Image (spheres, rainbow, N blue to C red):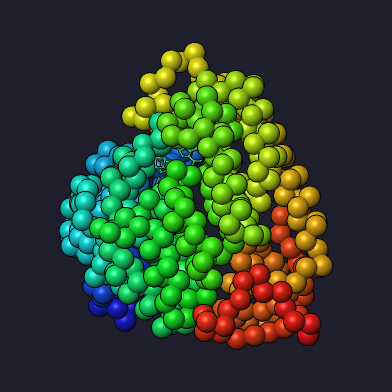
Amino acid sequence: MTSSRKGTVYIETYGCQMNASDSELMLGKLRADGYESVTTPDRADVILLNTCAIRDHAEQRVLGRLGELKASMSATSIMGVTGCMAQRLGPKLLARARHVSLVIGPDGYRALPALVERARAGEKATHTTFDFEEHYEDVAPVRADRVKAWIPVQRGCDYKCTYCIVPTTRGPERSRRLDDVVREVAGVAASGTTEVVLLGQTVNSYRDGGHDFADLLRAVGAVDGIRRLRFTSPHPNDFSDRVIAAMADVPAVCEHVHLPMQSGSSRVLKRMLRRYTREDYMACVERLRSRISGLSITTDIIVGFPGEDDQDFEDTLSAVREVGFDDAFTFRFSAREGTPATRLPVELTVPEEIATARLERLIATVRSGARERNATLLGRRCEVLVEKWARRGELLQCRTRDFRTVLIPGADSLVGRYLTVELTGTTGSTFTGTIVTERTPLPMAVRSIGDAAPAA
Ligand code: SAH
Ligand code: SF4
Ligand code: F3S
């Protein structure tokens, strides 16, 4: 028995930050309806998998997990699939896994309590229609993290890159109203959270009537108590001068951009319909770096896209060296049913072993560049925000403004605090550090950029 009116819910989340944010909304919706959230699936009344469809591997993992979780079900519990895979497969999922009785796409969470009720009454319930107005404005999310808050500002995507399933699973692009975003940010700031991350598939194409992303950055950056402002993921074509100026002007905007490149070959970029060339991408990097000093840049890269030859791949490696990415998420192309890339001539397919070998070389290139850059930072002092306990060991995980991870010894009471640390060691990708000064969060007005600490 539980103290909740309706029962318990367990949600497991896959995929991007947008999905993580949606899970917080789903939990908010169910909690308002009388459910209590639990952190293990065992005998939860409602088990939900909020899924990702971006690559075949992501879907296979979910299918495997659905099988595993069957063992956690009781005679009365129900299993549901939500998110992008639910949207893509719809009712087909019910046939694929017979213990699943609920399938809900990203625009259907408003109906979650009613659909859960139907499933618990023994029905099969699905909801996979798009709602072009849906932003869940009146749903209070239950946030997993008190240190930083995900703030969705845009749903869907209008770009239609030829490899990508997202326009199919999340529908067309729509932006939230600026006032609504600012109200949500003010709410999280009032609860003591000092960092926000604005989310959208091409977040810098945000537009609400007369307001663009530059206006949004300025408005969010002006909210009392917000000390760090990040956003993900921007599209290179949407970095207008106005947006870059806002990034440079607003003190809370951190010196880090995640700027998906996908390929360093203009030929491949054209086939991907990314709508920029290698030169355009480099020019974007240059414009950002010329206005924001100390900017770190991370990226996403796909290898083995149909038609990618050895020279195209060498172009990707040279682009990685030229930009000097601080980190990269690297992927082997995965053909997604229904996307334009699946209609390219079959002879353009890159054999799996070639794609795998390219991925390995790419990872090695990214790592060696990052290692070299990180070695030069040893001995530096920088401001970090303490996020949480690191996955293993007794160290706290902290972030610099430019998104480097620093592990420090410390106590629970430091979580959520800003400290100045000295970088004392590096694995090549992450750092270890020691505390130089401890400071409590300061109001925005006194925050300074690049904030090297005064000597202790
Ligand atoms: N909207 C974001 C990316 C969302 S998907 C953007 O445009 O930047 C995250 C990353 O997954 C993409 O940047 C891309 O690198 C990768 N990805 C998307 N579809 C893929 C596919 N079919 N195969 C392999 N990687 C893919
Ligand atoms: Fe997919 Fe391209 Fe849209 Fe990103 S911009 S979500 S990669 S279609
Ligand atoms: Fe995956 Fe959907 Fe995000 S496909 S990457 S969870 S938008």
Q: Residue at x 71, y 74 (%)?
A: 452
Can I make out residue 106 in this image?
no
All told, the count of numbered labels is 0
The residue at 41%/26% (across/down) is: 341
Q: Is residue 338 above or below residue 151?
A: above
Quadrant (top left, top right, bottom left, bottom right) of the N terminus: bottom left
Can residue 202 be seen?
Answer: yes
Query: What residue is drawn where x is 47% and y is 81%?
Result: 225
Query: x and y percent of residue 119 in the render?
Result: 21, 57
Residue 371 drawn at (x, y percent): 76, 50
Q: Residue 165: percent from the left, percent from the top?
A: 37, 38
Question: Which residue is drawn at the image coordinates 72% and 78% (left, top)?
Answer: 453
Q: Position of residue 450 (x, y in %)?
A: 66, 70
Image quadrant occupied by the C terminus? bottom right
Q: Viewer-proximal residue, 411 or 47?
A: 411
Q: Return the residue nearer the eye: 247 or 399.
A: 247
Residue 198 sits in which quadrant?
bottom left
- Residue placed farthest to the top in the image? 347
Reply above or below: 242 against 10. above
Q: Is residue 14 left or right of residue 421?
A: left
Above or below residue 346? Residue 38 is below
Judged left or right of residue 409, residue 403 is: left
Up the image or down, 285 lies above or below 341; here it is below
Horizontal placement of 330 versus 6: left or right? right
